[in-house]
Amino acid sequence: MPAPAEYRLVFKHIDEPGYTNDIECYLRHGGYEQLKKAFTMKGPDIVNEVKASGLRGRGGAGFACGVKWGFIDPTKNTKPVYLICNADESEPGTFKDRQIIHKDPHQLIEGMVIACYANNVHLSYIYIRGEFPLGAKILEKAIAEAKAKNFLGKNILGSGYDLEIYVHRGAGAYICGEETGLIESLEGKRPYPRIKPPYFPAVLGLYMCPTIVNNVETLCDVKHIIAMGGANYAKIGKPNNTGTRLIGVSGDVAKPGYYEFEVGSLTLGQLINDVCGGIKNGRKLQAVIPGGSSSKVLRAGEKYKIKEKQADGSMIDKEIGLEDIPMDFDTMAAVGSMSGSGGVIVIDDSRDIVSCLANLSEFYAHESCGQCTPCREGSLWMKKITRRLADGHGRLEDVALLKSVADNIAGRTICAMGEACSWPVQSFVAKFKNEFEAKGRAGKGPAVAATNGH
Amino acid sequence: MSATCHDTQDHVELKPEFVAHADELISHYPVSKRSASLPLLHFWQETHGYISNQAVEWIAGKLGLNPIQILELVTFYPMFRQHPAGKFQIKVCRTLSCQLGGAYELREHFMKKLGITKVDEHGLGISADGKFSVEFVECLASCGTAPVIMVNDDFYEGVSHTQADELLQKYN
Ligand SMILES: Cc1cc2nc3c(=O)[nH]c(=O)nc-3n(C[C@H](O)[C@H](O)[C@H](O)COP(=O)(O)O)c2cc1C
Ligand code: SF4
Ligand code: FES
């Protein structure tokens, strides 16, 4: 079956000829009309629309946005509430938020103002990764333009509601994407993630006040939920997997790029073969990392057992191959991985799979914040072992050693980076055991490979 | 991680515009001035090239903090430098999609062209004339157009070796 057409909601105007990122262009395309509509509603009603929409967070964890907002009851707490837009976009393989920031920043600002109004927030920050200096400038300009038109600032559009948004730049650390690390960083400290409980952002977030952290794409979706109503938004996609999803495909496909589809409307095979023109240079698929580098790898030729809901509501067991996996949250979880941040990395059969893992392990070792021993030491050892295996200095025992290191991190750390760094290792080693063992057997011995300039 | 600052630059006089902009940045954080630490570090580094002892002390003083509370940020966040890097800083993304797209070969190419043979403990190499520095960085969120690099604040995608040579001409 050919792939369904793209469903461009958030990316509607991205790369449209003549569309620019200034406010005049945005206004010509119906910009800030949903903000006006939102101001005719009460905050809790907006929260209810978002609940009805079924929107799940697009930052990685897929947590229901309305439920997250529902944790905060502005009528009951006496502290101010803050909202932070997570624009750290640093999960390897993910490149969607940058497109919005650069090409349609007002869409994000409009979504943020609506989200802030709904949750009675008067001070909000966009935490943008340090390596987006141009993105930060574009957002600052957009904020100034919105302020000049009174879509932001004091007494917005005569509603009596005040809101300030500021851009805050990170400085090159991946862990700032983890929401409590982000909050520490925004407080001017090292981005050491906080332990939960008690430091759930909704309770003890920024400056120890209730705080909402949402991804860029999630906040853009809020605008569209206001436009069409929560119930109509929920009709897009599938039950419990509603809306559209931005997907970035990179690696060994003929046409890498960013796309937007109805959640679950296309399969991984359609994405790779139809949308992205298949594997490059006539080679064959070896593996796919389906949801950012932290998601567990899928191997070509694998079969998965899933349950599929029938039209009459009954469930049937079904066996599917990699190419048949529908791209939605629940099925990706059912096949043992996750749709995570929407970044799909495709690896062809000419690639040395051990080197691919060594590359990712180097990333995690570099990015561990160092607070927890299992993550700090474990990520370092996983880097050293995968590197020496890849470079031909490993031994057969390294494969079991690697697995045992990975198996002893997850669940023993302060933040989900423990899982993020061990899932790739566990899944690569389990699914490509022969390849790893062959490297170990051919290894020239236990010499620890020299570092490679990093 | 080094716990000391290395001052290789003379003390700089701060212009009134610099101080005024610093105050403007601090005003973005009405709840806690400490939040302005990263913005002030960025602003200092953009203006003066790297974070010196003077920078640490001045920012700490400005925000009512102990210098160590600023220094510990400089030693943690990869983007802050305690030494000057090249006038033009080439950052090559090394993470998986870019590795598949030839990032390691691209870095090698830059190193060769610039005659850089030595790198410091962070992997930073500087050309003999101080004009260029080359280093690896992690995923720059542009994985679909690998390999990607930054030269100072500018972004380049799908960089071939020919384009790399052209960039070395352009930044001169
Ligand atoms: C190690 C780590 C890195 C993360 N990086 C990002 C990121 O770059 N961008 C992002 O939006 N969320 C990131 N997250 C998820 C955030 O913690 C948080 O769940 C998300 O911003 C919530 O927004 P959402 O509910 O709209 O998805 C990361 C999580 C972890 C554990
Ligand atoms: S799991 Fe890793 S990144 Fe997270 S807090 Fe612990 S050491 Fe830091
Ligand atoms: S891997 Fe290089 S930009 Fe993402």
Image: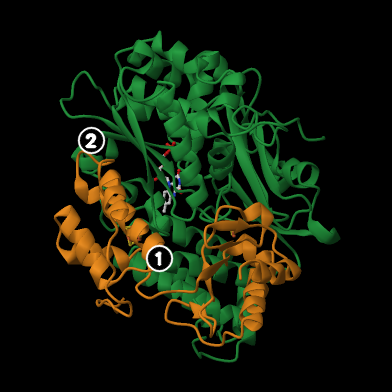
Q: Does the rendering let one see residue A238?
A: no
| Total number of numbered discs in the rendering | 2
Which of label 2 and label 1 is nearer to you? Answer: 1
Q: Which mark is residue A203?
A: 2
Residue name at image x 66 percent, y 62 percent: B147
Q: Quadrant of ligand 1?
A: top left
Q: Position of residue A94 (x, y in %)?
A: 56, 49
Q: Secondary structure at mark 1?
A: loop
Q: Badge 2: how crowded within 10 Å, few (<14), some, or many (20+)? A: some
The colour with which the image depicts chain A is green
Q: Position of residue A317 (x, y in %)?
A: 64, 35
Q: Badge 1: how crowded within 10 Å, few (<14), some, or many (20+)? A: some
Amino acid under label 2? Val
Residue name at image x 23 percent, y 35 percent: A203
The quadrant where residue A404 appears: bottom left
Amino acid under label 1? Pro
Please tell me whether residue A95 is drawn above or below residue A63 in the rendered image.
Answer: below
Quadrant where the image shows the N terminus of chain A: top right
Residue name at image x 45 percent, y 17 percent: A35
Q: Does the rendering let one see residue A284?
A: yes
Residue corresponding to mark 1: B78
Chain coloured orange in this rendering:
B
| Badge 2: chain ID | A
